[in-house]
Each structure stands twice: as C-alpha cells, then as structure tokens.
Image (cartoon, rainbow, N blue to C red):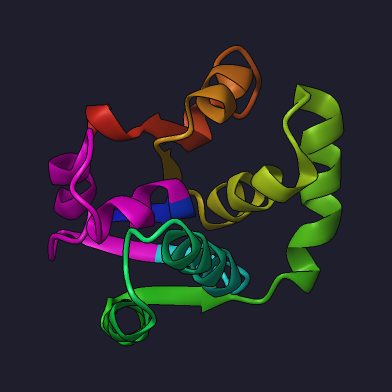
Amino acid sequence: MTLLVVDASVAAKWFVEEENSTAALSVLSEGNRLHAPDFFLLEMDSIFWKWIRRDVITLTEAESLRETLHRYPVTFHPLTPLIEPAFAIANRTGSTVYDSVYVALAALLEGKMVTADRKLYDSLGNSPFAENIIWLEDI
C-alpha cells in the first residue's frame, strides 16, 4: 500500500474531466492510503464555490459533489500540529505556508504528497523535501 497525501489540485480532477483526470482518479485505487490536512475540505468547498460562480456546475451539483467527496477514503489530520513544520518548510523552500502544510503532513507520515500544482512541485524539486512530493502524472 502506498501512503499518499492528496492536495486539492488532484482532488478537483476527481470531479471534472480535464488534463490528468485519469491519473487523479487512479489515486483513489484500493492500493493507496489517502491522507490530507483537515482544511482540504474547506479548500475543496472553495473550488466548488468557484465552479458555481463560473457556471461550471449548479449549487445542487456542488452539494452532490460535496457528499461524494465525504465518502472518499481520505483520512483527515488536524491543522494545528502541522503549522510549525509548514512554516519551517515554507521558509526553507520558498513554497507557501499553505501548500507546505501538505508537505509537512507527507513528511510526518513518511509518505508522498501527490500534486497537480506544477509551481509547487517545481519549487520543491531541488529541496530536501523532494522525496516527499510526486507529480500526478508520475503515479
């Protein structure tokens, strides 16, 4: 089993067909144990809200997507213990504190963070945390 910390850039692709959606859906396979910081749910709600505003989905569809998301096998972790390591990672790598929370969780769990955020992935590529991140296409 592979322990993966999944970020919202990957999870969003579970719900809309776009580049790398197939790879994102493969993350949900039974061979993976998925984890995320608890604010992942807030981040996903923000994405759903943007899609409503852009007429990509309706409010009713968003509510259905939210219910579906809550049924996916993702273990959530509280944010508070991740803040200090995320701040340190951000200052060491130049990535945002916000994104570094995912990296901190991956490091803590000795797993890999999977992302479709190219800027984040590239910012960590030559850092000590490169071993904790994987590009979605490489799944």
**In which quarter of the view is residue 3 placed?**
bottom left
**Residue 135 visible in the snapshot:** yes
Question: Viewer-proximal residue, 36 or 111?
Answer: 36
Q: Is residue 5 left or right of residue 85?
A: left
Residue at point 43%, 46% (across, down): 9
Q: Is residue 48 left or right of residue 85?
A: left
The verdict on residue 20 being magenta is yes
Total labels: the figure holds: 0
Q: Quadrant of the image for the C terminus?
A: top left
**As drawn, 115 above or below 78:** above
The location of residue 32, given as percent across then percent down, is 23, 59
Question: Relative to residue 53, is residue 21 depicted above or below?
Answer: above
Q: Closest to the observer: 50 or 123? A: 50
Q: Which residues are magenta?
A: 9-34
Q: Residue at x 32, y 67 (%)?
A: 57
- Residue at the spot x=36%, y=48% of the render? 10
Residue 106 falls left or right of residue 17: right
Taking the magenta stretch, the answer to whether it contains residue 43 is no
Residue 129 x, y percent position in the rendering: 61, 29
Give the camera-side residue of 137 and 80.
137
Q: From what the image shows, is residue 138 above or below residue 30?
A: above
Residue 133 placed where, x, y %?
A: 47, 34
Would residue 9 appear left or right of 101 to someone viewing this image? left
* Identity of the residue drawn at 36% across and 57% down: 11
Q: Nearer the viewer, residue 72 or 20?
A: 20
In the picture, which quadrant includes the N terminus? bottom left
- Looking at the rendering, which quadrant does residue 37 occupy? bottom right
